[in-house]
Image: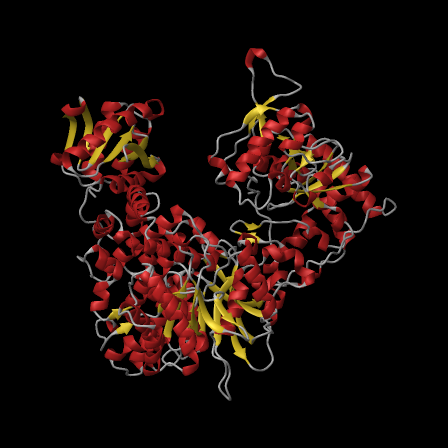
Amino acid sequence: MAIDDDALTAIIAELSIRPGHEKVRALLYRLLIEALGAKSEQIFFERKIPEVRGRLDALLGRTIIEIKSDLRREARDAEAQLTRYLPERESATGQRYVGLATDGASFVAYEMRDGVLVRLTEHEVRLADARGLTAWLEGVIAVLDWLPADAAGITNELGRQSAAFARTLGLLAKAWEALAADPEAVLKRQLWSRHLGFVYGKAIDDDTLWLQHTYLVILAKAIAAGTMGATGRSPEDLLSGRAFHEAGVHGAVETDFFGWVIQAPGGESIVASLAAHAARFDLGSVDVDLLKVLYESLIDPAQRHDLGEYYTPDWLARKVVRRALDRPAEQTCLDPACGSGSFLFHAVRLKREALIAAGVPLTEIASRCCASVTGLDVHPVAVIFARVTYLLALGDALPGRGGDISLPVYLGDALQWNVKRDAFESDLVVEVPRDPREGRKGAPTLRFPLGLCADPPLFDRVVTAMHDASEAGRTADAFARGLAGLGVAAEQHATLVTTFTIYDRLRRAGRDHVWGFFARNLSRPVALSDGARVDVVIGNPPWLSYRYMAPALQALFRDTARRLGIWVGPDEARLVTQTDLSGLFFARAAELYVRPPEGDRPGGRVAMVLPLAALSRGQFRAFRTGDWTEVRVAFSDAWVLDNQAVSPLFRVPTCVLFADVTAGEARPTPMRVTAFAGRLPFKDVPEEVADRCLRLDRADAPVPANFEAGSPYRPLFHQGATLVPRMLCLVDRVQSGRLGGNAAAPLLRSRRSPQEKVPWRDLPAQQGAVESEYVRPVYLGESIASFRVLNPFEGIVPMTPDGNVLDAKQASDHGATRLGAWMRQAEASWAQHSAGRITLKQRWNFQRGLSAQFPVQPIRVVFTKTGSRLASCLLGPEGIIDHSLYWAAVESMAEARYLEALFNSEAVRRRIAHMQARGEQGPRHFDKLMFTLPIPRFDPREAVHAGLAAEGAVAEEVAAAVALPMGVSFQKARALVRDALREEGVSARIDALVETLLGPDPRLALPDDEAVPARDEEETVDA
C-alpha cells in the first residue's frame, strides 16, 4: 500500500477527534485511495437516490457509507438512513450491500436481514494501531481482488470479528431455519452434538456454535483447496473434497457434518461466496506457520479454553519430535491430540529426511509416511488444518508419489470414552440420536466389533458393503452371505447383521449419508489400540481442568483415573478441582496406543508437553510414580520450561516428560531435569533462533509441594461467601436529588465493573429500594492492604440476624418485601443465565460461606486468597467477607495481631511461594498455603509471640498514617503501605521474629534459582 506510517498516523489522529462531516469525508477518501488501493472513479460522493429522496454520502462498490459528525448523538439517524438506502440498492441491483456509518472515530458496519438493519461489526480508531483501521475497512469494503496470505489479513477479512463472519453467520442461520426439519440435516447436527459430547462431557446443542463450526469448516476447506491449488470447483465439490479424491489423495477433505448447507435454499451461494472471499488471498503461498496462526486466530478463545488447548511453539514441537524419534526411518508414531498439526509436521519431515537418507525411492516416501505417522483430534476444524499441514510436510514427496495415498489424520476420540469393553460385549458403540419424528421412541445403536475396527481396510469395505446392500434393497440375510467373501470373521457376523438392519432403517428414513464418515473416524482410534500399536506417542494433550468439566465428563475422568490408579489420594482430596486432563491423557495414551515390550524388544515411548504441575503438585503424585494399574512406565527425561524463565511461552509453567512403557519396574519422574531459560523475540521462533536465545542447564527437579498441615490454625480459617455474580449482589446508592434518600430503604443499583464476565457484563443493571438492614458492607480482596482496611463495598445480603439465608419468597414472607422484589429479579437472571445446577441462594451460601459468618464476631483476621503478595488485616463486627478473602474469629487483639504480622511477612511469603499455582504473572494463589508452615497457636507467655503481636500493633499505626490519594488503585495503595512499613523498619523486625518462630527453612539448601522473588502488585479484581 502506498501510504506510509507517518501519513497514516496523521490521518488517524485527525479522524480520532471527530473533525466533522466534510473533513471526515476528505480523510476517508485518502484512506480508500492511498491505503486500500481503491481507484478514484470507483468512489461516488453525494449520489442521488430518487426512489427514497436522499443522497448517499459515499458509495464504493457494494458499500454505502453514511458520514456523521458524532455517532454518539447521531447513531439513530445514521441507522435510519441506511435502513432506507440499503434495501433500495439491493432491489435495484439484485446484489447484497453493506452499510458503513462513521464519524471518524467510530466505524460501524451493518446489513439488512429480513427487513431489519443488523449491526455486523465495529471499530474504534486508535493511534497506537493505525493499521488496524485499514485492515478492518478492507474486511468490510473488499476493495482489492488479490491480497497477500498473511494471518492478520485473513483474520481481519474472515475471522471472528470480521464483517464476512457476521454476514455469513446470518445467512447460515436463515439457511438452517429452512432445513431444520430435514431428517438428514437434523441427524448431522445431532451427531456433531454427540461428538462434541465426547469432549465436553455433555451433548452440545447450541445454534451459534453449530453455525460457527459450519462457517469455519467451509473456510478451512476453501483454504485447503487454495493451498493445494485445487480451486475453481463447485461448492459441492469443495465440501466433499472431490479434487483431492480425483488426484488420489484420500482423507484430506471429506463429506462431514457440515454438508447440510448444500441442501439448504441458497446454501451453494453461501459456500461459493465465502470461497470466493478466501480466494482473494494468495493461498498458494500458505505455509505451515501461517496455518497454525490461522487456526489459533479463527477458533474462539472460549472454545479453546473449554477444550484445554495450549498450542505448542514450533521450535519446541521440533525438539520434542527429534528427541522422541531416535530411529525415524523405522518408527511409527501418533499424536492423539494433534490440533493444527505442529507435531505431525515435524514427525513427517523427520521421517521423510530419514527415508531419503536411507535411499528409499521418492515414489514410496509419501505412502510410507502415511503408513507410520498418524494424528487424531476432536475438533473438526483442527483436523482439516492438520491434514493440510500433513500435505505441506510431505513436500516434494507429495507430487512425486507413486500412487494413491490416504492421510491418516482422523476426527476421533483418543480417550475412547465411546468404546464398550467388558465381559459381555467388545464393540465400538455408535448411539444413534433419536429421530424427532418418532416421538420418545428409544434410540438404536450401531455396533462394530473391535476386531473389525482393528483392520481399517476391512472396516471400510464392510461399511461400503452395508450402504450398497441397503441401496440395492437387499435383505439382511443377503448382506450376511456376503460377509464371508469380504473376509469378516464368522463370530462378527451376527453383530454386523443387526447393525445392517438398523442402518437400513435409517437409510429408508433419509438419515444415512453421514454414517460412513462418522463410523470411519470413530473407529480409527480403536484400529490403533487394538491393531498395530505405535512406537512413539507425541504431542500436547488437553490441559482441561477438572473444575471446568461438565459433570458427565468429570465422572468419566474420575472413573478412568481411578481404574488407572492415578486419581488423587485421600491426602490430596482437596486438590481435586485443580487436577486436569493432561496426566490422564498421558497415561491413557501409554495404555492404549504404545507398543508393549515383547521379548528382548523394549516397549514404546510417550513424549508429551504437560503443565509443570505434573512434576510438583499433589494432584499428580500418583501419576509421577509411573506405576499405574494397567500399564507401567519408566520416566527417562524431563524438560522444565518455567514461563518466568522462558518467555514468551505458555500462560502457565510447562514441562516435557519422556517415558518408556516397561514390563519391569516402574521408574518415577527424574530427580534431575533440563531447565530452559532465556527470552525469545516471539513465541513461534524457528528452532535455530530458539537455540541462540535459550540456555539449557541441568538442574534439580522441582520439589513436590507438600500441602500437609503444619499449623493448628488451618481448620480455623474459612473462605468467605461466594457473592457472585457481583452485579446481582454489590450495589451503589442512587442519588435521589432534592427528594432525598430513604434511610430505611435506600434506592440501589447494581455496581458495575470492567472485570465482569460474560454473560453478566452484558445484562442491564438492577435497580430498586431494599430495606437497610439487608444492605451491609462487603469486604473483597481489593478492600484490604497490609494492616489496614481500604474501602469496603456495599452489598445486598439476604440474611436474618440469626444466620438464615433468605430467597425471594422467604424474604417476602419475612416482611422484607423490597428485598423480596430485588431477589426475585436476581433469581430470574440467575436461572436464565447460570448453568442451572444450584439456586442463587445456594450459590451465595456455598459451603456455608455466608451463614457461617453469623453471628458476626467482634475480632476477625482476614487475608487475601490470591495475589503476588499476601495482605492481611483485622475487621470488626461490621460487614460480610467475600470468597476472595479467608477469615477466622479470634478471642483477643493480641492473637489477631500475632496472626496478621505473620501473614504480612515476607518471610512467610518466601517459604510458600514454591507451592503457589503460577500463571503468566508468576505465583498467584495463597489459599491456606501458609498453614503448611509450623505456625503455633498464640501463647502470650512466649516472647516471640508477644513480640509479633506488639509489632502488629505498631504496623497498624504506620499503615493508618499513610496518606492515600483520592481514587488510588488498591494495588498502589498496598504498595504505599508496604513502602512505609519498610521505611519505618517494621517489616524487617517482623521478618526477623518470623524466622525465629519458624526455625530454619529446609529449602535454603536448594539452588539459588529455586527462590521465587515477589513481583510488583498486579492483582486482578475478582468479578
Whether residue 284 is visible here, answered yes or no, is: no
Q: Relative to 810, is 318 on the left or the right? A: left
Residue depicted at 29% across the width and 54% down the height:
218
Quarter location, residue 546: bottom right
Q: Is residue 745 left or right of residue 954?
A: left
* Residue at image point 48% right, 39% down: 759
Q: Residue 968: name its quadrant.
A: top right
User: Against 229, is 809 above or below?
Assistant: above
Query: Residue 372 placed where, x, y %?
Result: 36, 76
Percent across and percent down for residue 408 are 34, 70
Left/right placement of residue 583 relative to residue 513 reads: right
Residue at the far left: name it: 41
- Left/right of residue 495 with respect to residue 143 in the rendered view: right
Looking at the picture, tell me which residue is in the foreground, 652 or 567. 567
- Name the residue furthest right: 941
Up the image or down, 519 lies above or below 930; here it is: below
Image quarter where the C terminus lies is top right
Task: Say how the picture is coloured.
Answer: secondary structure
Farthest-out residue, top: 738
Viewport quadrant of the N terminus: top left
In the depicted view, which residue is nearer to us: 189 or 497? 497
Q: Nearer the viewer, residue 439 or 379?
A: 439
